[in-house]
Amino acid sequence: MSTYDLPFIPFNDGVNLDSNTISLNATHPANKMLEYDVHNLYGKMQAAATKGVLTSAESPVKDKRPFIMSTGTFAGSGESSGHIIGPNERTWDDLKNATAQIMNMNMFGVPFSGADVCGTSGDSDQDELCARWMQVATFYPFARQFDEDGGNEPYSMSDESYKTMA
């Protein structure tokens, strides 16, 4: 079966994603399923296997609740793991999109989800954006501060932005 016989061909910046990953028409030998049909299940299955190992009777941490976060999830993955929205940039559009994505993840059965507050990279002079993002993040089920550039931590913001945040 040719990749081009699939219901749609995923493109990214004009490049067929099939050229940068495993062929979407590859067949899994155990169950004869196409990669196209099961590709997104990998993250869900990996999280379920990890949770199974951590909670098994032989596990030294079996009495602890596992904390598993993933960027690769599928509907119902919330049973085993949470989902991290990202990477996102330090922009107003990404603030808006992250909030919508968190709501979508809840509908997909992954209630424990969240975004990188203030984005992972971008213009570090966006104090107001970061202050507003931190206000919104108080309502995220999961929020983390992950910053490649530095400069969007609360202590590094202007006094005015810090007061807005508080």
Image: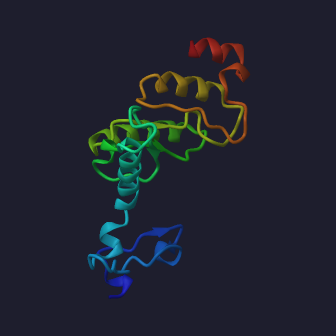
Note whether 69 is above or below 32 in the view shown.
above
Describe residue 87's horizontal placement relative to residue 107 as left or right.
right
Indicate the colouring scheme.
rainbow
Marks counted in the figure total 0
Residue plotted at (70% across, 21% down):
157
Q: Quadrant of the N terminus?
A: bottom left
Note whether 161 is above or below 37 in the view shown.
above
Give residue 92's position: percent from left, percent from top. 54, 36
Describe residue 100's horizontal placement relative to residue 123 as left or right.
left
Q: Quadrant of residue 3?
A: bottom left
Note whether 134 is above or below 87 in the view shown.
above
Q: Quadrant of residue 141?
A: top left
Note whether 23 is above or below 141 in the view shown.
below
Give residue 154's position: percent from left, percent from top. 66, 21
Describe residue 74's horizontal placement relative to residue 139 as left or right.
left
Depth order, front residue of 58/158: 58
Q: Quadrant of the C terminus?
A: top right
Q: Residue furthest front?
A: 58
Residue plotted at (30% across, 70% down):
37
Give residue 95's position: percent from left, percent from top. 50, 36
Residue plotted at (67% across, 14% down):
160
Give residue 33's position: percent from left, percent from top. 28, 76
Describe residue 37's horizontal placement relative to residue 137 as left or right.
left
Depth order, front residue of 81/159: 81
